[in-house]
Amino acid sequence: MSKVVEISPTTRHEGHSKLVLKVNDAGIIETGNWCSITPVRGVEKLAVGKTPEQVPKIASRVCGICPIAHCLAATEAMEASIKVEIPKDAKLLRHILQLANRLHSHALHNILTLPDMYLPGTDVKINPFSPEEPVRSVAKRIQRLREIGQTIGQIAGGEAIHPSNPKVGGMYENCSEQARTKMYDLAKEGLVLAHQQAEFMIAVLRNYQKRDWVDVGGMKVALPKDLGYHDQGYLATHPFYGSSSMDENPTWDIRRFKEVRPWDWYMGEMEVTLEEPKYPVGGTTKLGTKVNPQMEACTGIPMYDGQPVEVGPRARLVTYRNFDEKGTIGQQIARQMEFQDCLYEMIDCIDELNPKGKVCADYIPNGDGTLGWASNEAPRGTDVHLAKVKDWKVQYFSMLVPTTWNFATCSAALKGAPWQLAEVIMRGYDPCVSCATHMIVVDEDHKIVAQKLIQQ
Amino acid sequence: MLYPEIVIAGCGNPLFADDGYGPAVIEELQKLTLPDNVKVVDAGLGGPHFIFTMLDPEVTKKLVIVDIADYGAEPGSITKLRVEDLPPGSYRDAHSWDLAEPLQRIKDKIDVTIIGCQPARVTDPEMEIGLSDEVSKAIPKTVRIVLETIGVDYGTAI
């Protein structure tokens, strides 16, 4: 008889989500639902009536890890609506910023992945914070790659977290000759490290794939050879950057897109009938707890050609590089393969960039209310923004973020796997489940201490 | 080097009313000319991934975090907190470093000060732009406290 187990919250990714799994007697997932439980409401509403300059700033605040992708997609959706072509050097700076962000993000994801993996030839899981070799030098390399990504992003984008340089019509500033040389030097250093890092990660991932079992909180779990396989399609709009409705041959088609509500797709109300206190960290949800993915899921289910699709590194490699490996490990390997691509492309863009070139269009129209869209291949997948701008006011704005595409696809990929490995499958998608607020809530005891510290 | 000796990070999300306090203070600080060893960053929600885990203790000696804090005071009141005063999980990164707090890991190597302001209104999950009057009024004072914390005397204008 089927049992229901819930892992909430899921860990080692951005935001809040949970997994509700219906499993058979052997613990194999029959139906898996992965859903976002982060409510974010009102970006669309908030954008209406604002200027096209303000909306990309608003969009970039929706997430704490991919502000760059959202800023670029929103800026370009505005440009697509008002139909402004940006100068070549502005485009190159945006490409460099985009790739710098991807480099940082993939390196960060390595740290989230490694604790699931084993040191080749041993039964020891990798602790990326271990002071011992060989892990220590890997951790240092990851940090350096992140630092290189962030520094290049800061030069091209103005600021490394919330980029200040992109604007509707191009960029505020080009970079100096000196800054261009610095980006070039950093990218060349990064390329060597990226090769080493990708090789290391691929070796570790292949080693995992060859194992017969893995340990999860002291439970020995058989590792299926088809971990994370699914038969959904893939969607990617560019090998590294994106597309827009202004392109001669746009690679995304709004007519092939539709969004359905979670209750058409997720399971209804159930009760947790399987609890595992040993599951890290802190055990699964208590027996008897009521769960209702249909009602709790906070996102819609986007479909392309009537089906949920996978977006992200593998989707890009399948679409543009004839990559064909399925499953979680295939997906992770695709991500590592993007490391070098990312730096080769960045070096090409830096080579081509003319620091004396113009970076803003001469004429920026006010818009006539045409629907424009722009996609951005964020580290974790296709991020599509849609906008209508009329008389320099935004009339309509919508965001289709990468992980929303992946929720239903990953849910399908969970089927057939032992429930203990559901999070490993989910982490393969490098989920970014939107963000909420940050507020320090000082507890009762500390309130007294804090009160004393109030400054007059 | 990405981050210099002194880093001032404004944390929070301007899409949720008073949660935008950190970035708003940063906007004011960016108007000032500060010494070369100081970097002022609008961290938004990215503090843990982009700053706290990327500081090099050989270079960075001081981190000042500006954020809202609910500590039961009047809205707009400002407090200075140390990492020890923070309840566990305050800056736990969901993209977590081993589920530990990045600030706990760096506090012995880098001097960390948190400047917290009591919010009047945080609208999460509904989005709303704009600080309450109480919190807006706290900004000039916060700028003064930040400058004092990093030992910069900006004269009588502020």
Image (cartoon, rainbow, N blue to C red):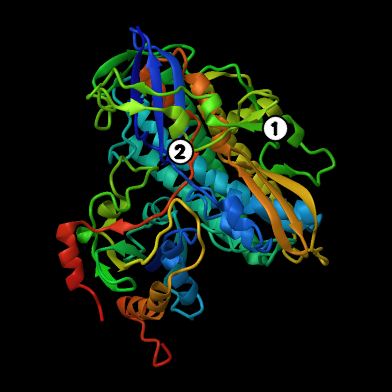
What's the residue at 34%, 6% (across, down)?
A: A1
Quadrant assignment for the C terminus of chain A:
bottom left
| Horizontal side of residue A21 vs A236, given as left or right | left
User: How busy is the neighbourhood of tag 1: few (under 14 within 10 Å), some, or many (20 plus)?
Assistant: some
Residue type marked 2 = His
Q: Which chain is home to disc 2?
A: A
Is any part of residue A36 visible from this angle?
yes
Residue A91 showing in the rendered view = no
Q: Residue at x 50, y 60 (%)?
A: B128
Where is residue A362, by image quadrant?
bottom right
Tell if the residue under mark 2 belongs to the same chain as the one under mark 1: yes
Which residue is the site of mark 1? A257
Residue type at mark 1 is Phe
Work out whether residue A449 or residue A324 is closer to the camera in this orientation and state it: A449
Q: Residue at 46% of width from left, 38% of height from top?
A: A109
Q: Chain of mark 1?
A: A
- What is the secondary structure assignment of the residue under circle 1? strand
Residue A247 in percent (x, y) is at 81, 44
Sequence order check, earlier mark of 2 and 1: 2
Direction from residue A150 to residue B58 in the image, left or right: left
Please tell me in which quadrant of the rendered image residue A7 appears.
Answer: top left
Q: Nearer the viewer, residue A192 or A349?
A: A349
Residue A342 image-quadrant placement: top right
Return the x and y of residue A381 as percentages of the image width and height.
59, 37
Tell me residue B121's x, y (percent): 39, 63
Above/below status of A341 relative to A186: above
Q: Which residue is mark 2?
A: A109
Q: Nearer the viewer, mark 2 or mark 1?
A: 1
Residue lying at the far right of the rendered structure: A248
